[in-house]
Image (tube, rainbow, N blue to C red):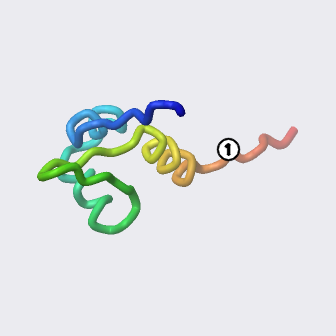
Amino acid sequence: MAAIQLLTIVDAARHLGISRSKIYELLAEGELSSVRIGRTRRIALAALEEFIESHTDPIPARSA
């Protein structure tokens, strides 16, 4: 079984280049999922990758 990489809120924010408060906002809106471990919250690296993929705009093809 592969180990799941979990990131802190601060690390997830750094990974995306956004603030901690924006991470909490995305969590509250259901845009990003997290795991609660005791009193802390962790975000799976896979969840961040899914978030990035789902919010990536396709680059339009250039016409000749």
Q: Which residue is mark 1?
A: 59
Vertical position of residue 24 compared to residue 13: above or below: below
Vertical position of residue 59 compared to residue 14: above or below: below
Residue 12 spot, x, y in % from top left = 30, 38
Q: Secondary structure at mark 1?
A: loop
Please name the residue shown 43% across and 36% down the image. 4
Please name the residue shown 36% across and 38% down the image. 16
Vertical position of residue 19 compared to residue 21: above or below: above
Residue 27 spot, x, y in % from top left = 30, 60
Please name the residue shown 66% across and 48% down the image. 58
- Residue 29 left/right relative to 4: left
- Residue 38 left/right relative to 47: left
State the quadrant of the C terminus: top right
Question: What amino acid is found at the position of numbered circle 1 in the picture?
Answer: Ile
Residue 49 spot, x, y in % from top left = 50, 41
Please name the residue shown 33% across and 45% down the image. 43
Rate crowding at label 1 as few (under 14), some (14 to 19) or many (20 or more) other CA atoms within 10 Å: few
